[in-house]
Image: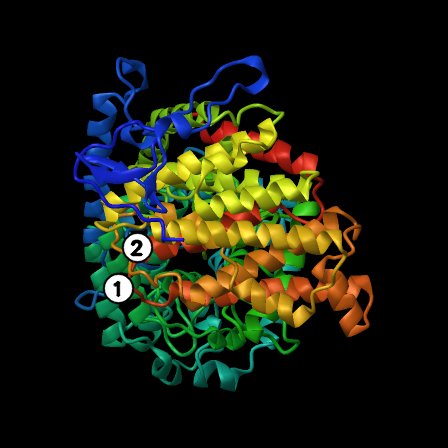
Amino acid sequence: MESISLLPSVSSVPRSRAPLDQRNGILSFRQKGRYVKNEQSLRLRPLGKFFSRVYGAFQDDPTKDSGDRNNSILVSDEERIETLVMQIKAIFRSMNDGEISPSAYDTAWVARIPSKDDPAKPHFPTTLDWILKNQHEDGSWGEPSIFLLYDRLVCTLACILALKSWSRGPEHTERGLKFLRAQAEHIGKETTSLRTSGFEIVFPSMLNEAKVIGFDLPYGIPCWTEIFALREKKIKRIPVEMMHSVHTTMLYSLEALQEVVQWKRILKLQSRDGSFLSSPSATAAAYMNSGDAKCLEFLTYIIRRFQEYAAPCQYPFDLLERIWAVDTIQRLGIDHYFKDEISDTINYVHMNIGEKGVSWGRDNPIPDVDDTCMALRLARLHGLPVSSEVLENFKDENGAFICFPGETHRGISDMFNLYRFSQISFPGEEILEVARPIIEQYLQKCVDNNQMDDKWSLKKALDKEVARALRYPWNMSLQKLEAREYINHYGENDVWIAKTIYRLYNVNNPKYLELAKLDYNRLQPMYKREIKSILKWWTGCGLNDPFVTRVHPKAAHLAIAATLSDPEFKECRIAYIKSTSIEDVLEDLFHKHDSISDLKLLSQAVKQWNPSLVSSLGLKVKVIFMGMYDTLNELAIQASNAQGRDVFPRLHELRMGRIQYYLKHREIREIKHFVSWNEYTENGKKDHGVAIRLLPAMFLMGEILPDNFLQSKMHEQLSLYLRLLTDVRKYENMMGAETTSPIHSYINEANCTEEEAISHVKKMTEDAFHELLKEYLKPRDYPHCRRLMFEHGRITRFFLGDNISSLLAQREKINDDLERLLSPV
């Protein structure tokens, strides 16, 4: 038999049932030297009603809906999107050392510094003016947008001590003392997980100073006594020699340790910018005790940087700002507007990943697990080389992961970001493989017990963020659905916790949220038009009848629209939905149809690409064959025009190979034949199921593909991963009822229990995914097509759900997700 081919046309494609050859501008398929005439094609009457198949569906632009102006995004919204994009691009371009809110606590310490020319006057007098102007009505100082008692106590006490040192604002001082007395006992009711950094060190230290000055405060109340005891206990844990010889987090609170610090020695641990761990308060104390010029240079720089009014709680924090800004924009689903900006930003962060990890600022010598995991994760996902071995620096003496050495309790956000990084581990990264289940268990316990107060931030919905990430791991998450959720969880007014509460204007920014909502909503009309086009095709093929199949293309649309949502991929999405839906129908047919002889005849018809061979079969088989036949013809025409060459032979070859696989699998099941485990895994790598689903869509992604594109390790890993994934889930769903399952083969060959076999196959599945991820993230050509291959793995995992969900629950979840995808925010 001659090979069947398609000749690409430069003219429009007519809506014809005829197989295709190019004659007088009309395309037809040639078979055995003859043409299949229109009258030879099948005309079906399903369930007593005539129907016509939809031909040339790809000629109709699915994103156009003539006359329906209500589906068009308002011009004003488009203009607003353009404006927001420009403004956010400007934010990225202007990122330097960071944009942060002022800290009353640190400003108060800087305000204490005497002038070099006249010690009776402050060196930074404007800081005192700022303190006088920024007292709250209740007499306190601190972050105005939110009341956290730890923050208000340290800020208020620091400010009245600064005012007292210069005999300024006695009425402000009295109001501050009144606030402290009124709130004194309330500190015992506050959750310890929300303590500001070093509170148990700095607050008692300032109370001692206040007592010497003579401030009337209730020093002996039990809750304050407990804090004093905690301070003494913590200071005793600090070896004085270590404190002066290596960088520790105690450098961040030098102002509270003045009685034990040897100032000449401690200067050896000064950061390159002259600060001590980027802390203005610690650096101010160091300057007042040592007179070091570099300390004063740092303080002068930040006061001028912040318009000579106030100091932040830490500075610079160029790495923290960049890391979290990129992560925020990606999670909100608006990163496609800022590809260049994100690339430049991540390259900057990558250059500052040190051997010990990443800190909030480039000159800070003490990294933390939070910034490190975020930086490593973003760099890896952008194809940059990173090593997870750096995480060895964040283990305590018991092997548990910590954010900083010496911390008294774990945070939520830092462990959450360690968990997120662990999900994109590469094969052989034992430290991440070990960390993942431990951290997952810790986070799940926090969620279950409603213990979600974070030591590093006060976020709008951190509890919901973590709960969703645990319910939908990264390997089964779809970007647009995740963006839909994060739009609800994102707090443009969230605050962060250090020695005081602070705000990061380039991380928590209302512009990001506004753009995310506008961008999400503008896609709704496009989604609806695409579904309308798909349902028209589905009905035209006769596949909408439950008698034929229970498969529905809406689910496929949900998956691909939530994954490749860019308008430029509209043709790719439609092709993916059609290919995937047809494949699901065929797979279902070969699994459930009673007559193997019917399936063999259908297989022969596919091989010859001859509809007349199925004319004697039942209605259901004929409808499915013609739906597959017409759809592949249409896809081949469009793909050939896009690729500039005839791609039908390749598509037909894949189609034949997959049909033969279905038939062989059915025969094996009928005779209850066991396939060896090695044969099973080797065949899994060569499976054409992935190719026939994806290749038609890949041809329409704007990349000209070579004939051997799918002959790659990535394709092998994806095929093996999906084979293992689907078979183990099928086995679990059927409770082991299918005796020809490869799981049974492994049980017999390994002489193990069912539980051990399932555990082994799940581990293989996980390993295959991480091998796939590693291949995907290697810098290669054809990024769009490789992305579709990888995302298809996550889509399949999404649809299969987890091993604790029933099929009914999984379907309900998918329906809910579909409704959310189509609903504006």
* Residue under pointer 2: 311
Q: Closest to the observer: 698 or 46?
A: 46
> Which circle's residue, 2 or 1, is located before the other in the chain?
1
Name the residue: 40% across, 53% down.
1
Compared with 291, 30 (above or below) is above
Q: Closest to the observer: 757 or 84?
A: 757
* Residue under pointer 1: 299
Assign the C terminus to one quadrant of the image: top left
Compared with 712, 551 (above or below) is above
Tell me the amino acid under the disc marked 1: Leu
The crowding category of the residue bearing disc 1, from other C-alpha atoms within 10 Å (few below 14, some 14 to 19, many at least 20), is many
- Assign a secondary structure to mark 1: helix
Q: Is residue 791 visible?
A: no
**Quadrant location of residue 638?**
top left
**Quadrant location of residue 709?**
bottom left
**In the displayed structure image, the side of residue 605 where residue 93 appears, left or right:** left
Q: CA distance from mark 2 to mark 1?
A: 8 Å
Name the residue: 31% across, 50% down.
647
Which color scheme did the rendering employ for the protein? Answer: rainbow
